[in-house]
């Protein structure tokens, strides 16, 4: 961020944020969260549509020392309230979609920071990075708390420390060798671990993140358009999503490296993907 503050960090629809602007927005919000009492290991819920504000919110929580609790507004309200009841955060970052998904009853027990506000309470706060040492933040503190699907019973919260997240990112950095020339298409809900790879690895290496909306991430025609229009060089998706693209007639994208995870990859699909598409 300091080396190339004018480079494009994030693209969503018609909005583009440079590294300098993304960092400044996250820092201002982080200082606001610290003033609200956010401390290391404290869960902070975040429920927003996929947007630049969502990325700013995630980074701000991490910079403030909190552990973000991702809530996808597209999920059923009952599931979201169950997670809130179990994790018991005191603070929520949200927008209109988050408010609607959670409902007034759930919001009544939380302090809400609305990222939809035209004029924010933190707009004039310092754009400098919070000092992690002054916060008492260490690598063993929590980065986020993510909940299992609940397919085998009640969803359970899994606590992920900063050091675990960093080890994951460093490992993939060694494997993928991203540079500032790369463009990563992010399509995964923040309620899944792999979203961390899509959002943080590119921004750690100076690459560009193209953030797909939920609607675009589930439609083959718009995914194909995003891949071609933004000259995407890296995308991670489940076998189901890659199959969706291929069954819709996608013939591959020049220069694209393919990552596939989340479920078993059938051999015949692996063969289709590997035909010159960088798998």
Image (cartoon, rainbow, N blue to C red):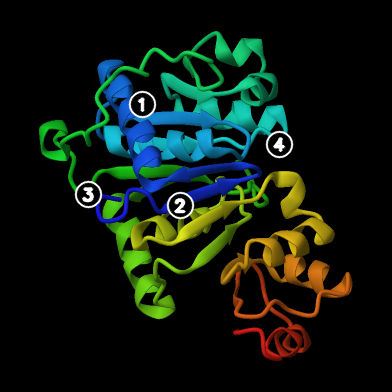
Foreground: disc 1 or disc 2 = 2
For disc 2, the neighbor class at 10 Å (few under 14, some 14 to 19, many from 20) is many
Where is 57 relative to 203, above or below? above
Quarter of image, res 191? top right
- Secondary structure beneath disc 3? loop
Q: CA distance from mark 2 to mark 3?
A: 31 Å
Q: Residues within 10 Å of mark 4 (few under 14, many from 20)?
A: some
Q: Position of residue 179 (x, y in %)?
A: 39, 71
Determine which residue is flagged by label 4. Answer: 74
Q: What separation in Å lies between label 4 and label 1 (alpha carbons)? A: 24 Å
N-term mark: 1 or 2: 2
Q: Residue furthest right?
A: 248
Q: Residue 252 versus residue 67: which sits nearer the camera?
A: 252
* Image location of residue 170, percent across then percent down: 32, 68
The Cα atoms of the two marked residues, 1 and 3, are separated by 23 Å
Q: Which mark is residue 29?
A: 1
| Labels 2 and 3: the sequence-earlier one | 2
The image's mark for residue 8 is 2
Report, in whole angstroms, how far the alpha carbon at label 2 lies from the one at label 4.
28 Å
Closer to the eye: label 1 or 3: 1
Mark 4 vs mark 1, foreground winner is 1
The label shown at residue 140 is: 3
Q: Is residue 40 above or below residue 4?
A: above
Whole-percent x, y for residue 184 in the image: 54, 63
Marks 4 & 3, CB-CB < 8 Å contact: no
Taking the spot 41% from the left edge, 29% from the top edge, the residue there is 44
240 displayed left or right of 278: right
User: What is the quadrant of residue 173 in the picture?
Assistant: bottom left
Q: Are marks 2 and 3 in contact (CB under 8 Å)?
A: no
């Amino acid at each position: 961020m300091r080396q190339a503050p004018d480079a494009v960090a994030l693209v969503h629809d018609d909005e583009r944020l440079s590294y300098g602007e993304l960092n400044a927005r996250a820092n201002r919000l982080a200082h606001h969260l610290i003033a609200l009492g956010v401390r290391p290991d404290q869960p902070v819920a975040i429920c927003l549509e996929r947007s630049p504000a969502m990325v700013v919110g995630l980074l701000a929580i991490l910079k403030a020392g909190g552990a973000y609790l991702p809530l996808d507004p597209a999920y059923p309200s009952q599931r979201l309230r169950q997670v809130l009841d179990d994790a018991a955060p005191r603070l929520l970052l949200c927008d209109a979609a988050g408010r609607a998904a959670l409902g007034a009853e759930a919001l009544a027990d939380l302090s809400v920071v609305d990222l939809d506000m035209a004029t924010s309470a933190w707009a004039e706060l310092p754009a400098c990075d919070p000092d992690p040492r002054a916060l008492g933040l260490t690598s063993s503190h929590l980065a986020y708390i993510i909940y299992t699907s609940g397919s085998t019973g009640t969803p359970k919260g899994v606590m992920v420390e900063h050091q675990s997240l960093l080890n994951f990112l460093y490992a993939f950095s060694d494997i993928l060798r991203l540079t500032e020339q790369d463009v990563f298409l992010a399509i995964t809900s923040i309620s899944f671990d792999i979203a961390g790879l899509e959002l943080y690895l590119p921004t750690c290496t100076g690459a560009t993140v193209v953030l797909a909306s939920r609607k675009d991430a589930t439609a083959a025609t718009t995914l194909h358009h995003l891949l071609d229009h933004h000259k995407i060089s890296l995308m991670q998706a489940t076998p189901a999503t890659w199959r969706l693209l291929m069954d819709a007639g996608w013939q591959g994208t020049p220069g694209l490296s393919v990552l596939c995870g989340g479920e078993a990859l059938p051999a015949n699909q692996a063969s289709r993907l590997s035909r010159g598409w960088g798998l």
